[in-house]
Image (tube, rainbow, N blue to C red):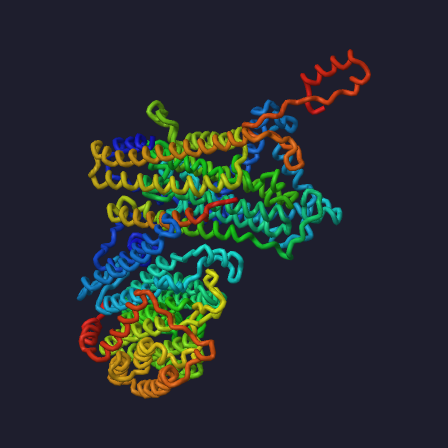
Amino acid sequence: MNSYAPILVLGGLAAGFAIFSVVSGMLTGPKRYNRAKLEAYECGIEPTPQPVGGGRFPVKYYLTAMLFIIFDIEIVFLYPWAVRFDSLGWFGLVEMVFFILTVFVAYGYVWRRGGLEWD
Amino acid sequence: MSALALIGPLTADATTPTNYENLSFFGRDPWWLILIKVVAVFAFLVVTVLMAILFERKIVGYMQQRIGPNRTGPWGLLQSLADGVKLMLKEDIIPTAADKLVFIIAPLIATIPAFLAIAVVPFGPANNQVSIFHHRTPLQLTDLPVAILYVLAATSIGIYGIVLAGWASGSTYPLLGALRSTAQMISYEIAMSLSFVAVFIYAGTMSTSGIVNSQHSWWNCLPLLPSFLIYVVSMVGETNRAPFDLPEAEGELVGGFHTEYSSIKFALFFLAEYINMVTVSSLAVLMFLGGWHAPFGLVSVWHGANSGWWPVLWYVIKLVLFMLFFFWLRATLPRLRYDQFMKLGWKVLIPASLVWLLAVAVVRTLKNEGDLNRSHLIYILGPVVAVLVVLWIVSELRYRQTSAVEKAEEAATAAKPFDPMDGGFPVPPLPGQTLPAFTPRRPRAALVGALVESAEASELEAGDPDV
Amino acid sequence: MSVLTSLLAASPGDPTNPGGGLGGATSTVTNTFTAPHVEYRALMPMLVVFGAATVGILIEAFLPRTRRYWPQVGVSLAGVVVAFCFVVANHGMAETTAADAVSVDGVTLFLQGTILLLALLALLLVAERGTGLVDLDAFTAQGATTPGSGGERAADAAGLRTTEVFPLMLFSVGGMLLFPAANDLLTSFVALEVLSLPLYLLCGLARRRRLLSQEAAMKYFLLGAFSSAFFLYGVALLYGYAGSVRLSDIATAITSSPHSDVLVLAGVALLAVGLLFKVGAVPFHAWTPDVYQGAPTPITAFMAAATKVAAFGALLRITYVALPGLRWDWRPVLWGVAILTMLVGAILAITQRDIKRMLAYSAILNAGYILLGVISTTSKGVSSTLFYLAAYGFATIGAFAVVTLVRESVRGGSDSGDGGEEDSVTVGGEATDLSAWAGLGRRSPLLAACFTVFMLAFAGIPLTSGFTGKFALFTAAIDGGAWPLVIVGVIASAAAAFFYVRVIVLMYFSEPLREQGAGPIVVVPSPMTTVALTVTVALTIALGVLPQMALDLADKAAYFVQ
């Protein structure tokens, strides 16, 4: 059988377990209505009004997300290179050194421009 | 340190690099065996989590001179189970402001992928199989040529669960907590993924069984010590555990992304977090600590240590030790500030792991191409050491400079007279400042009699100045 | 770069990865992966340009703000010049390299040389900062500040300079060098993105009329991203059809495949959308006027000239190397596109009142002419396209260089913040309205003469490069059997001559507005713009008077490797 089949079975079991838990949790628990209980929790003070369907994320996090993508793409290139490292020899090393140095240049730029500062 | 670690495998592994990637042992099980194994690993995860929660409370308790839970079952063994049942029977609250569908789906998205990673964890050797109902099978659910990538992918999906939970709650603290949590997990995932690259270079494969196999003579944590250390730090950040548990910093964010969750949905997030701990610990064991291999030296004494069911024991021991390490950290270290935490991830771990990776790659290539012997190491390590020394001197000079500046500042503040009511509020003294000499108000008793006065005044000077 | 391309190129049909490596149970992967051979000499022009761009980023990161300008200018110019030397040294080369991802042949080298020369001239325009008396910086002090905000004023007052434009432009040039050389569609796509992304940014960095500039950048980005998606989807369909993204494999699959043609036709159509968008052909031209108008003029010059060269290079390679077997399918479509492009370009240009918009429609019109060369599917068609691209590029850069020098006068105001006297007249933004150009010939005869040369070249008047180029294009098209197109082309030229000559008439035979106190000022630039202007005028005339050498070069360069 395919080596992915056990993963599917495990995923099915996990999904069954999780969905069963959520559904039965909804059914077994008590239901006592209380308006204050259903308000957003803010340590007892009046909740901050939220836009319907969730708020907007601060733009700072997009910067983190984009930096993450840059490095994640780098890693995507590094993995196959690492696995075939021995057969690539000097060629692979030199090319990858150039690649990593290039990413380092961008990294240095971001660093110097304060893209990695949190306050 | 890193230089010394590199010399080891150079001498020990002189043969041409072996290709460990052999997946022909997998994908051959009949359906009933798959079912048995799936249920077994699932049960293993759930029981490990239940035990881990209990042990955490016990150990943290002992470290704080307490006993921990001890009422439910012998030695409190059934405590986690009882908690689970109790949570199940609690009211399931969905706040009015929440996005209902996403709010319900989020814990599922966090939990289900968390279970998946265990599928490729090897509990025993692939080629030295055990017999289950007269059917020979490896002690591993399955293996893939891209197993580690699969683990990373599966665990990354869990992040969606967290960010969706925070977003769908319709509340301030969960939103902030979810964003912190996501930013933290993706930041530390980079360092974590980078620390694997050196292991792949050594193992020549991404399949878990191959990686464990390749460590038969040396566990990777020795030659790749920096990678291992980077991984250990980033794995704690990746699982949002103390001292990196900023998303759940109760002083700032109440409960973080799951503030609005209750009942079994909350329990599912809890479950996912602990399963992720098991997953990253498993990865640490199989990538750096030799996986199921018996501890050093044991095989030379006892040849059967790595065959049959015994590897499961070694694996579980290593796993448990790693989990204990997590609990130890929680009991010992205070939480980091968020900017310090991000700085550590982006400005220390990532460049460090990239530089280390380059070092590994260069040395490995030199060795592979046959150009390397001991004398060449001087030429390679010389400049590296020189650069490190220069960097150390520079940083030392800088430190002295800044500390001189700090001292000057401190002296400046010390020179300023301390005003205990600065800006109209009572303030504590800064470093270098001293409280002005305290002159107690004359007690009213003094008006009454001189005898009483002398006694009370001496008492006040010796004791509480706040009166 | 080359790792990237080789990895991309190695993935499909890679013998070490049977069945995508997902088989698991039976895959006994062996270590037979061999490193692709990379002919670094052939890649040197791109590597040098990308290297210079990287050095530029380091300069940005580690030099103090006030000391970045000259190193940036030096590195950029040096990078482009060295890359050009490598292109010259590679002449006559015909090979594919980096796992067949890049093909270096006559067409590639000719276009790379053209792009580098155009980039050099455009860099001179970008580097223009005025002479100390007047500040001619075309770029905003700080791109991140909101237009009209206090932050912007503070950045202006602090004298900040956006020197990032140099590395950004070099990255774009690098992508342009790769685009016509890409021998497989994935490399094409990577090159397309590398050349486009910096351009999107550069478009939004204008110093004056920043909202217009940012709007232009936004439009260009959205539409460009959309067209890239079309391109990528086309690549996917062609890969599904041919089982490879390599151009020569697609050509083989087209002639020999038993499959239905639907997939390949749909793929080619989507691919064409992406390419024709970059070229600016009707009906994918809508972005051109807005973006050309809003972008900083040096960037408009660069974009109008060099992007067109690169995109037509890629279009030539894809149609001539991958799709000769489908000639009877794509030619009628391109016929339609060419006719539409020429007519729409010519007619809408007549109605324009803004000089930059007029030049934008002129760019559309010229894209139509160049399509004639692509359609003819002969070697003569290729060589005439090459020649026309070069001729058009130089004239365009020159024309926009003139535009940067005609400025509005701001009476009494102190735009640069130095607090001039009440009656003084300071230099404002570019005076792009056609009415402002009236009588320019009387006040600045030299500048007007330069602009006249470019207008005559665009109109295709003999003794200018435009005439030679158009003549070569039309002859090639007639040889290729596309005579109806040539007729449309001639009609469009006649219509176009009207609005080109109208500008000349306006400059020489109209009363200047100066007397009414609202007339423009012609500023004296630093040697940078002067050099660029001189070179473009000289080349435009030289290619018209003595075109034979350049024509021979284009003839010799008109060959592809598979």
Q: Position of residue B287 (x, y in %)?
A: 39, 37
Q: Quadrant of residue C88?
A: bottom left
Residue drawn at (27%, 34%) of the image: B381
Please say whether residue B425 is visible from this viewpoint. yes
Q: Nearer the viewer, residue B181 or C114?
A: C114
Q: Position of residue C155 (x, y in %)?
A: 47, 56
**Looking at the image, residue C222 lies above or below residue A98:** below
On screen, residue A77 versus residue C558, left or right, reads right
From the image, which quarter does the C terminus of chain B lie in?
top right
**Which quadrant: the N terminus of chain B?**
top left
Is C130 situated above or below B295?
below
Residue B30 lies, with reference to residue C398, above or below; the image says: above
C414, C340: nearer the viewer: C414
Tally the numbered discs.
0
Residue C205, given in percent of the width and then of the height, sits at 43, 62
User: Residue extending furthest top?
Assistant: B451
Front residue of B380 and A38? B380
Above or below, comparing residue B323 to residue A105 in the picture: above
Q: Please state if B110 lies on the left or on the right of C374 as rendered.
A: right
Can residue A13 be seen at all in this image of the molecule?
no
**Residue C293, image quadrant:** bottom left
Q: Residue furthest right?
A: B448
Residue B321 location, x and y as percent? 47, 29
Which sits in the foreground, C511 or B175?
C511
